[in-house]
Image (tube, rainbow, N blue to C red):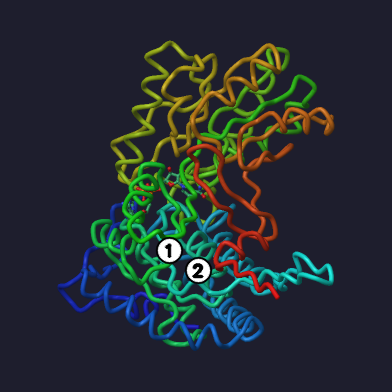
Amino acid sequence: METYDALLASIAPAAGTGRTIFDPATGEAVGEAPVHGLDYLESAVAAAVAAQPAWAALGHDARSAALLQAADAVERSAEELAQLLSREQGKPLNGPNARFEVGACVAWLRATAGLPLEPETIVDDGDTRAEMHYRPIGVVGAIGPWNWPMMIAVWQLAPALRMGNAVVVKPSGNTPLSVLALVKVLNEELPEGILEVVSCGREVGARLTDHPAIGKIMFTGSTAGGRAIIKSSADTVKRLTLELGGNDAGIVLPDADPKAIAEDLFWGAFLNTGQTCAALKRLYVHNDIYDAVCEELVAVARQMPMGNGLDEDNVLGPLQNKAQFDVVATLVQAAKDSGARILLGGNPDTSQPGFFYPTTLVADIDNNNPLVVEEQFGPALPVIRYSSVDEAVEKANGLDVGLGASVWSPNLEAARGVAARIQAGTVWINRHGAVDPRIPFGGAKQSGYGVEFGVEGLKALGIPQVING
Ligand code: NAD
């Protein structure tokens, strides 16, 4: 364990060569991030290529042991990492935010180390014996977003390492410090070269996606970014796991208890101040309980303090960057212009420093409004009325994305029936966004392809090989 200042200094570039990263809550400098160019990227890839065979040769047990040690290292530096994450990303220390995210990194590393993966006997009939094994791919490129920068980096790198690959991580240019610090801490326990990080813009990072030495890209980000990577990886026929944008629908059935579900609905939508891929982004509520659900949501939302993440009382923070603030402001304005009813928020105070957009709930909004059909990725939830379940399902399925969704009802059988009709990679019942390292997670439609987590997620970081005979 080292102090916060020592951790920050350990990832700082030579004086005058870096880029200053600013706190989205205050506008104050957080630290300096290196600006790596193509030469650096090439040397990182070369180091990974050189280190990977020995790592692969260690076998699963030794690699799992190394991941467990790396998890312990993260745990030892948890508070310093959370402080940095809070300053750079904006998310509060408390609530399901910075400390929670660092805790999730530890949990995912440990869970990934413990996943069982045995060769599968596919056919053994006395004549033919065919076994399926999963071999390392080689070097994996891990490209991540700025909303959960540490946790998503671990989602990508932990299964890749466990499967015997080396990894080159490219963090978002908005949150490089968090990922640089995380990798630095992980590398206290990992052999040299198997986990590299390149702190670069997307133009340099794009080289990973057509690099002949990279066998797979794990990408989490926007659907537009995913499309670009599909194209640039085509010539080298890279394997891809794409976790892309979502616009998750929640359907509240008429027998739900508004008071009982309000807090879970709130966190489903406002986790990380709404900057979560699988957050509830469109809420469909049956006419019979529409007003009651709106009222209870407002009551819960009013109790959730938003402000500087380092203040221990806050559970909501700023948008991470000005561009995302502008997206949210524009979409809420479109809702207001259409005559939708603002239940809470809707008026940012731009005289304050920081990209704070107040918690916003919008009722009586048309299903075609931009706040409904576009991904807001911020603290503004549209609540849409419906009068028949068929109508709600049709609206939920009406977009070209399908990451998560949820159905809310005490009648689990009815809820499961509705869930089966929704086009999404995961449909939660009476909660939203609950991910678990044991349970596969991925998108339907243009929310991407491939799954992360669980044994299926591990297999996605290997090359299936059949031994027949
Ligand atoms: P983004 O696509 O702008 O950027 C994501 C990362 O990809 C960044 O590191 C960026 O520099 C890099 N990148 C973008 N285009 C690239 C290219 N052509 N080649 C190489 N690298 C490239 O996304 P963002 O704004 O950082 O993140 C927000 C988006 O991510 C939202 O749409 C959100 O829904 C999505 N997201 C999805 C998941 C999921 O699991 N499905 C999780 C978190 C975020």
User: Could you tell me which residue is drawn at 84 percent across and 32 percent down?
Assistant: 413
Please tell me which residue is depicted at 28% across the width and 72% down the height of the picture: 41
For residue 322, the mark is none
Give 20 or 310, whichever is nearer the viewer.
20
How far across and down, in percent of the image, does residue 109 sit? 60, 71
Give the number of callouts.
2
Closer to the camera in the image, 306 or 136:
136
Three-letter amino acid code at disc 1?
Ala
The amino acid type of the residue labelled 2 equals Leu
- Outermost residue on the left side: it is 16
Q: Is residue 292 above or below residue 146?
A: above
Give the structural element (helix, strand or loop) at label 1: strand
Residue 364, percent from left and from top: 54, 14
Q: Secondary structure at mark 2?
A: helix
- Which residue is identified by label 2? 157
Query: Are the residues tagged 2 and 1 within 8 Å (C-beta)?
Result: yes
Mark 2–mark 1 distance (CA, rounded to whole Å): 7 Å
Point out the tag, 2 or 1, that comes first from the N-terminus. 1
Depth check: give the residue in front, 178 or 242.
242
* Residue 142 marker: 1
